[in-house]
Image (cartoon, rainbow, N blue to C red):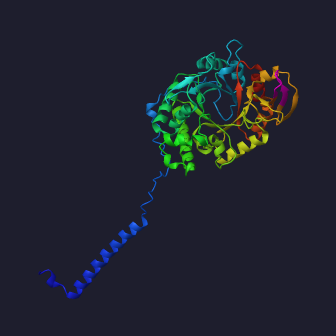
């Protein structure tokens, strides 16, 4: 009691009042907290930024480079190298090889020989075109004809085999949203490229298994992002886009680790607002890919596509809108290339000109062999109509006939290199047309 005797009664009253005030304040805060926390709502924790995993560990990747270019060759440049894709289904070993002539006249040949397999770590070679020559054989033919030319290999995602479409889409979804699957895929591609010493680089053409709006639930499930659907699909699309950009960035590092280059194709768009009816075209971030890869290739064709109604395949004003929009990303000079069509579509149509069955694509050689009445043209493309042996009506639009004019327009207006889709041994007329337009 001696402690308290040293204080006055007034001081004690003040102390008691202060303690009571503190206790009352704490109680009010607790009550207020209970009032504002509704028992019928739970907060959903949404990640603030895409969780795309750690960067690629280059120390785990093979470093085998391509063969050295002869000292007499000029410096290799994607910015000044136009060329064409060579496809295996037109690689007929029974006819004269057109690859040497193509290699001599074009700065770049890209062999469309690889496909994404049924797992992130599986790479397939021309799984559907068993009669085509092995990849190393066509690379050797190009190298022998022109050791100074650039030779690339394309991997595509549209191999289906016996797999269901949903299963195939799940393979790509894992690569884009699962960091471990992405690293497995990069390891597999880096290893595959070391097997082809005559290849200067890799081209990624992933478009067929990119998600449509109907595939977003699958992507949400695989990426453990179910909380983003159905109320916030834009955030899910941002996650997929971030995963795609990261894949291309890491693949570029992997290719540079081998002294090779990486090119990335992109479905085209001409505006920024996401169109969920054409979602795959919005998965490619032009800015990120154009900055981190060696070249972004805009596939400026199929404006009128095989399952739609007939019309020009690559209208001139649309090509202009496509590259004008891409240039708003301020890509560095030489990073942008435009792919133009060197084929035709044959649409079965009804009397009003509406498609009744998906079109088949035709080579210039097949078009030249036909005896169809010309119905007109637009944007440099020739238009034919005819009736088949059963009386069925057809419309044909030949984009290859306008390749030279469109190539000249792109080079003059955009300053971009041009890639032609497509050439092959079984299409002599098409090869000659491409060489004349781009060579």
Q: Is residue 11 above or below residue 86?
A: below
Please indicate, yes or no, whether residue 327 appears anywhere in the rendered image.
yes
Viewport quadrant of the N terminus: bottom left
Please indicate, yes or no, whether residue 256 appears anywhere in the rendered image.
no
Q: Which residue: 61% across, 17% down?
A: 130
Residue situated in front as seen by the camera: 42 or 334: 42
Q: Is residue 383 above or below residue 424?
A: below
Residue 120 colored in magenta in the image: no
Q: Which residues are magenta?
A: 383-393
Farthest residue in the left direction?
Answer: 2
Number of numbered labels in the structure image: 0
x then y, percent, for residue 274: 64, 48
Q: Is residue 161 above or below residue 265?
A: above
Q: Is residue 188 left or right of residue 388?
A: left
x then y, percent, for residue 157: 59, 31
State the image quarter where residue 331 is shown. Answer: top right
Q: Is residue 14 left or right of residue 88?
A: left
Farthest residue in the top direction?
Answer: 94
Q: Is residue 74 left or right of residue 315?
A: left
Viewport quadrant of the C terminus: top right
Q: Which residue: 68% across, 40% down?
A: 268
Residue situated in front as seen by the camera: 305 or 192: 305
x then y, percent, for residue 194: 52, 24
Q: Which residue: 63% across, 37% down?
A: 295
x then y, percent, for residue 311: 79, 36
Residue situated in front as seen by the camera: 435 or 363: 363
């Amino acid at each position: 009691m001696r402690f308290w005797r040293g204080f006055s009664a007034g001081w004690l009253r003040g102390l008691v009042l202060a303690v009571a005030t503190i206790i009352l304040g704490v109680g009010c805060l607790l009550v207020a907290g209970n009032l504002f926390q509704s028992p019928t709502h739970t907060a959903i924790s949404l990640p603030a930024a895409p969780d795309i995993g750690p960067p690629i560990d280059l120390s785990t990747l093979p470093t085998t480079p391509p063969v050295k270019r002869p000292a007499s060759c000029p410096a290799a440049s994607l910015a000044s190298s136009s060329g064409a894709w060579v496809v295996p289904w037109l690689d007929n070993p029974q006819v004269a090889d057109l690859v040497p002539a193509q290699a001599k006249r074009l700065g770049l040949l890209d062999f469309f020989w690889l496909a994404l397999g049924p797992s992130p770590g599986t790479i397939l070679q021309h799984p559907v075109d068993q009669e085509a020559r092995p990849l190393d054989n066509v690379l050797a033919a190009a190298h022998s004809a022109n050791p100074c030319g650039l030779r690339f290999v394309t991997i595509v995602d549209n191999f289906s085999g016996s797999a269901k479409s949903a299963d195939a889409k799940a393979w790509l979804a894992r690569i884009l949203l699962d960091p471990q699957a992405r690293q497995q895929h990069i390891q597999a591609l880096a290893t595959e490229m070391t097997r082809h010493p005559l290849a200067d680089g890799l081209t990624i053409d992933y478009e067929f298994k990119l998600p449509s709006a109907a595939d977003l639930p699958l992507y949400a499930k695989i990426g453990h992002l179910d909380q983003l659907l159905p109320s916030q699909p834009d955030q899910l699309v941002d996650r997929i886009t971030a995963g795609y950009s990261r894949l291309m960035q890491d693949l570029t590092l992997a290719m540079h680790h081998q002294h090779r280059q990486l090119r990335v194709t992109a479905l085209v768009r001409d505006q920024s607002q996401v169109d969920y009816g054409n979602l795959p075209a919005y998965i490619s971030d032009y800015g990120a890919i154009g900055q981190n890869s060696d070249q972004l290739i805009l596939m400026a064709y199929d404006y009128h596509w095989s399952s739609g109604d007939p019309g020009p395949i690559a209208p001139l004003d649309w090509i202009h809108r496509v590259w004008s929009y891409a240039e708003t990303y301020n890509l560095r000079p030489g990073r942008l290339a435009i792919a133009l069509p060197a084929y035709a579509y044959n649409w079965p149509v009804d009397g009003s000109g509406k498609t009744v069955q998906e079109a088949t694509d035709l080579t210039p050689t097949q078009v030249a062999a036909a005896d169809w009445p010309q119905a007109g043209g637009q944007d440099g493309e020739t238009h034919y109509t005819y009736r088949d042996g059963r009386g069925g009506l057809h419309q044909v639009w030949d984009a290859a006939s306008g390749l030279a004019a469109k190539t000249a327009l792109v080079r003059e207006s955009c300053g971009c290199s041009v890639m032609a889709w497509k050439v092959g041994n079984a299409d002599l007329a098409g090869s000659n047309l491409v060489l004349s337009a781009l060579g």
